[in-house]
Amino acid sequence: MPTITVLYFAAASTATGLTTEELPLPAPSESDNASCLPLSALADLLAARHPGTKLREVLAQSQWAVDEEMVDDPAQVDDPAQVVLRGGEEVAVICPVSGG
C-alpha cells in the first residue's frame, strides 16, 4: 500500500505529539486502479486520525509543502484535485509563525 510521510512543525507537532507520521493512502476506488489522495482532502484525513486535538484548527491556518515545494492553498485553487498525492511524497504542514 502506498504511503506518504507527513512532517509536523510547531503547533501541528504540539497538537499531534508527533514530528513525523507515515500515512497509508486510501485504497483505490473501483473506477481508479491507483491509490491517490487529493491534497485538498489531507487535512480532513489527518484531523480524523487525531481526534480530540486542535489539529483541525491548526491545519485550517497552515500551508502545505509537497516534496519541499510550497503549494498554494488547495482549497482556493480552481481545481483542488490538481495536487494529487500518489505515494512516496513528503508533505510538510507549515504553521503560521509570529514574532518580531
Image (cartoon, grey):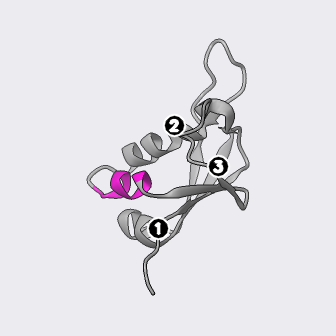
Q: What kind of residue is marked 2?
A: Ala
Classify residue 34 as left or right of residue 41.
right
Expressed as whole percent of the image width and height from the top left, the position of residue 76 reads: 53, 40
Expressed as whole percent of the image width and height from the top left, the position of residue 98 reads: 43, 77
From the viewer's perspective, is residue 80 above or below residue 11? above
Residue 93 vs residue 96, the one in the foreground:
96
Q: Is the magenta stretch mostly helix, strand or loop?
A: helix
Classify residue 88 as left or right of residue 14.
right
Find disc 2 in the rendering and name its residue: 41
From the viewer's perspective, is residue 12 above or below residue 81? below
Crowdedness near tag 2: few (<14), some (14–19) or many (≥20) residues, C-alpha within 10 Å: some
| Sooner in the amino-acid sequence: mark 1 or mark 3 | 3
| Sooner in the amino-acid sequence: mark 2 or mark 3 | 3
Crowdedness near tag 1: few (<14), some (14–19) or many (≥20) residues, C-alpha within 10 Å: few
Whole-angstrom CA distance, mark 1 to mark 2, is: 20 Å
Q: What kind of residue is marked 1?
A: Pro
Find disc 3 in the rendering and name its residue: 4
Crowdedness near tag 3: few (<14), some (14–19) or many (≥20) residues, C-alpha within 10 Å: some
Q: Which of marks 1 and 2 is in front?
A: 1
Taking the magenta stretch, the answer to whether it contains residue 91 is no
Q: What stretch is highlighted in magenta?
A: 53-60
Expressed as whole percent of the image width and height from the top left, the position of residue 60 reads: 41, 51
Find disc 1 in the rendering and name its residue: 96
Whole-angstrom CA distance, mark 1 to mark 3, is: 23 Å
Q: Residue at x 59, y 43 (%)?
A: 24
